[in-house]
Image (tube, rainbow, N blue to C red):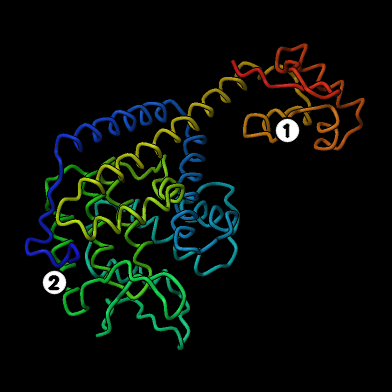
């Protein structure tokens, strides 16, 4: 028996003590992140929001096996956010659509969730459906055939889940809308429940995962009371994709107790926020570095490679690598490096090979 077939569905239950403790941990981290973001300048904050939303859109699509161009997504997000120097985004109707869906969800988080809004989002996700594709766009699925989540080869498929029949969808969705707009449950818990509830109903012929995570992001923004997204839940889900599908599947067959799902969701959210904290801390350290050395007189080659060292330099920095990246002679590279060592920016490190290596001094 699936969860939606339970007599008391959707009256979910959970271990309140365990969930409350995990929720408190998450809220503490979110509070720390909000405090750190408040110290950032306007431009840095915008850049952080841009990075987070780009990652969210890329990863939510990637979970479904849809790989998008990072440059296209970032450009479209910047364009639709109205950020300066955004440039004109590449013409990609699907990218424009998914970005518009995300921005509508988080920028207008207080707008009620209703069928018309969902239908508009669904239409934006499927801008060019071919006639041979069996996808109903902009409305709930209507087929009398079972909606099943399957894996495996044709003829030996494994059914992981069967959704409610299409005739039950309108009523079930109205119950979900009512919960989203009127329930007094904590906002983060509401986001977790709404995502589970939505994918349980599986109201569309395709796109349910992406829309379920869009609803999740909308409710997290509503919980934060902020249109600025500084962490990416979809990126954390993508990193834990296997356990994500596993816990969703087990929750669908385990009665109305959704403790396992809520605890998994909160742990994943905590992971997402902590990752954002690390990134923000590095941003603050980088800003402090450039403030300290604002009058140091670095040349363009030095500025370029110092920024690379802050943003994630692969491998070890050696004179030859500096020369290759900066497109200069080895002698010039050595003079650049020695100047930074003298100024207390770089330090020599131990090396197993013959070449001397250098690291950035970050404190």
Q: Which label sits in the foreground, 1 or 2? A: 2
Residue depicted at 10% across the width and 56% down the height: 11
Residue name at image x 73 percent, y 33 percent: 304
Screen quadrant of the C terminus:
top right
- Can you tell which quarter of the image residue 125 is in? bottom left
- Provide residue 215's location: percent of width, then percent of height: 30, 56
Residue 310 or 124: which is nearer the viewer?
310
Point out the image quarter for the N terminus: bottom left
The residue that label 1 is drawn on is 304
Q: Secondary structure at mark 1?
A: helix
Find residue 206 and name its label.
none
Q: Residue furthest bottom?
A: 131
Categorize mark 2 by other alpha carbons within 10 Å: few (<14), some (14-19), many (20+).
few
Apparent side of residue 327 relative to residue 148 in the rendered image (left or right)? right
Circle 2 is placed at which residue position? 171
Q: Quadrant of residue 136?
A: bottom left
Q: In x, y percent, where is residue 355?
A: 84, 24
| 1 and 2 marks in contact (CB < 8 Å) | no
**Which residue is at the front of the view, 114 or 198?**
198
Query: Which x, y percent locates residue 284?
Result: 51, 25
Q: Nearer the viewer, residue 153 or 117?
A: 153
Is 158 drawn above or below residue 333 in the view shown?
A: below
Is residue 238 or residue 345 the one in the foreground? 238
Q: Position of residue 92 (x, y in %)?
A: 55, 67
Q: Is residue 61 left or right of residue 321?
A: left
Q: Residue furthest front?
A: 156
CA separation, marks 1 and 2? 58 Å
Question: Image quarter for residue 213?
Answer: bottom left
Q: Is residue 200 left or right of residue 98?
A: left
Q: How many marks on residues?
A: 2
Earlier-in-chain disc, 1 versus 2:
2
């Amino acid at each position: 028996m699936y969860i939606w077939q339970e007599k008391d569905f959707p009256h979910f239950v959970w271990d309140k003590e365990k969930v409350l403790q995990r929720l408190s941990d998450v809220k503490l981290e979110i509070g720390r992140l909000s405090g750190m973001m408040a110290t950032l300048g306007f431009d840095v904050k915008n850049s952080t929001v841009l990075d987070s939303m780009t990652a969210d859109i890329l990863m939510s699509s990637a979970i479904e096996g849809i790989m998008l161009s990072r440059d296209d997504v970032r450009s479209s997000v910047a364009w639709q956010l109205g950020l300066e120097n955004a440039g004109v985004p590449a013409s990609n109707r699907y990218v424009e659509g998914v970005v518009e869906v995300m921005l509508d969800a988080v920028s207008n988080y207080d707008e009620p969730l209703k069928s018309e809004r969902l239908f508009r989002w669904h239409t934006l996700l499927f801008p060019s459906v071919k006639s041979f594709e069996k996808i109903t766009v902009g409305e709930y699925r209507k087929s009398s055939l079972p909606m099943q989540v399957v894996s495996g080869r044709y003829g030996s498929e494994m059914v992981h889940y069967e959704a409610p029949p299409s005739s039950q969808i309108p009523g079930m969705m109205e119950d979900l809308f009512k919960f989203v707009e009127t329930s007094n449950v904590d906002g983060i818990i509401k986001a977790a429940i709404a995502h589970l509830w939505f994918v349980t109903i599986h109201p569309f012929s395709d796109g349910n995962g992406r829309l379920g995570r869009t609803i999740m992001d909308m409710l997290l923004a509503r919980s934060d009371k902020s249109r600025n997204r500084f962490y990416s839940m979809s990126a954390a889900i993508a990193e834990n994709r296997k356990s994500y599908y596993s816990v969703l599947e087990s929750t669908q067959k385990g009665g109305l107790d959704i403790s396992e799902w809520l605890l998994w969701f909160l742990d994943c959210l905590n992971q997402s926020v902590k990752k954002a904290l690390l990134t923000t801390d590095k941003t603050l350290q980088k800003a402090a570095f450039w403030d300290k050395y604002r009058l140091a007189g670095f040349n363009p080659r030095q500025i370029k490679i110092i920024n690379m060292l802050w943003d994630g330099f692969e491998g070890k920095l050696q004179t030859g690598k500096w020369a290759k990246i900066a497109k200069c002679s080895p002698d010039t590279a050595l003079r650049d490096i020695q100047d930074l060592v003298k100024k207390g920016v770089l330090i020599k490190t131990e090396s197993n090979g013959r070449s001397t290596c250098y690291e950035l001094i970050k404190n």
